[in-house]
Amino acid sequence: KRIFKRLGLLTGNEDYDEIALLFADSLNRNTKVYQEYHALIVKHAKELCRKQALCKGCALRKYCLEAP
């Protein structure tokens, strides 16, 4: 949620089910693809897009509304 809010794709008021539905509708119905995508989002959030973000190493930095 934090990643997509920082990218301007969410307001931050959406609950988990709303976000999951949004991405499930946007992605291929292939469960393996969805699971891989989810795992990569979680990894990025844990390693870089934390509460105290580590923007220096982020590939999405140029798209982020909160990056220095």
Image (cartoon, rainbow, N blue to C red):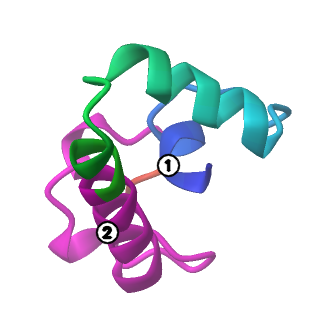
Determine contact: label 2, label 1, CB under 8 Å: yes
**Magenta segment includes 53:** yes
The residue labelled by disc 1 is: 66
The residue segment tinted magenta is 36-65
Dot label at residue 23:
none
Secondary element type, mark 2: helix
Q: Residue at x 39, y 56 (%)?
A: 38
Tell me: 31 left or right of 22: left
Q: Tag 2: residue type?
A: Cys
Secondary element type, mark 1: loop
Q: Residue at x 38, y 57 (%)?
A: 68
Residue 52: percent from left, percent from top: 57, 80
Q: Residue at x 32, y 43 (%)?
A: 31
Q: Residue at x 56, y 21 (%)?
A: 22
Q: Tag 1: residue type?
A: Glu
Q: Is residue 59 above or below residue 22?
A: below
Near mark 1 (Cα within 10 A), the count class, few <14, some 14-19 or many ≥20, is: few
The residue labelled by disc 2 is: 55
Kindly report the secondary structure that dominates the magenta region of the rendered protein: helix
